[in-house]
Amino acid sequence: MRRIKHNLGRLPQVRMGHHRMPDAVLGIGLVGAIAVGTLLPVSQAIADPASKRAEAAAVATADAQGADRDGDQAASRSEDRQAVQQDQGQQDQAQQDQQAADQQAADQQAADQAKAEQEKQAAEQQAQQQAADQQAQQAKAEQEKQAAEQAAAPAKKTYPNNLDGWIEEARDVLAANGKHVPSAKAMRAAAIAESSGNPSAQNNWDSNAKKGTPSIGLTQMIMPTFKAYALPGHTDIRNPVDNLVASSRYCDARYGNMDNMASARGYGSHWRGY
């Protein structure tokens, strides 16, 4: 009531001339004004808590809805982040798997190349070894062949470097070439009678020398006759063996053989040039 009176006291005082308005109207207006001034604060007081409660409820509801929306949005964002993180993780994993696969492929390629290079080197070494073995086998076969030939061939005969040795070798040369072989006695008689057994002897005063063809060597042959009866490989007139060979063949052609010629001259007892 005090609040009503206080409010009534705050109402503006309406001053009107009574002479302008009837008293009945004035009274009704005064009563209405009082009623309005009294009831309005009361209704506001009554309505204000309810309004505030409704507003608070609306705010709470809005807050709850906002919280729900925020929660939903947060959950959605969390799910989005999880999805993004999952996608990123999958991408990272896929990238790591790809890198691992690439590295494995590179390692395998390097290993294959290294293996191929090793196999190539091994093949080259094997080929070289085979070539070396083949060469060694060929050399061994050649050595064995030469050894067999040397074993099959008779040992080369050696002769003394004197008249007997020259006569023996000359007789072997004639036999090897299929020619008539005179006796050693006939060859010795011819050598002693013609040059006293000196293969370097040369006659520069007889008729042959005057003609420009002196008698030379062990059996004193002139060069044209020597060349005509020398054997291949035995063409040195001053070589005692070659000289004896050519002389024997000349006697074969002229006298039948050297033994006939030597015997006719008494093997030197009444020797004359032939």
Image: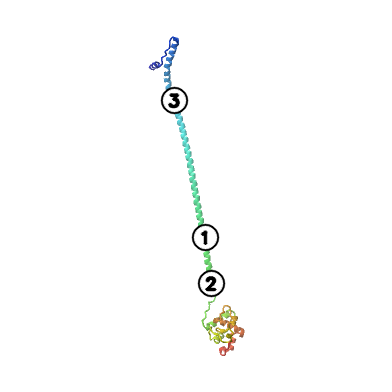
Q: Residue at x 53, y 72 (%)?
A: 146
Q: Residue at x 52, y 60 (%)?
A: 124
Give x and y (percent) for residue 185.
Answer: 55, 86
Tag 3's secondary structure? helix
Q: Residue at x 46, y 30 (%)?
A: 66
Q: Nearer the viewer, residue 54 or 161?
A: 161
Q: Mark 2 or mark 1, which is nearer to you?
A: 1
Give x and y (percent) for residue 115.
Answer: 50, 55
Question: Could you tell me the amino acid type at mark 3?
Answer: Glu
Q: Quadrant of residue 145?
A: bottom right
Task: Please tell me which of labels 2 and 1 falls first in the chain.
Answer: 1
* Marks 1 and 3, how far apart at CA: 99 Å
Q: Horizontal placement of 43 versus 257: left or right?
A: left
Q: Horizontal placement of 163 versus 7: left or right?
A: right
* Marks 2 and 3, how far apart at CA: 131 Å
Question: Could you tell me the amino acid type at mark 1?
Answer: Glu
Q: Residues within 10 Å of mark 2 (few under 14, many from 20)?
A: few
Q: Quadrant of the N terminus?
A: top left
Instruction: Tell me the tag on residue 55.
Output: 3
Query: Looking at the image, is 65 positioned above or below residue 81?
Result: above
Asked whether disc 2 touches disc 1, contact meaning CB atoms under 8 Å apart, the reply is no
Tag 2's secondary structure? helix
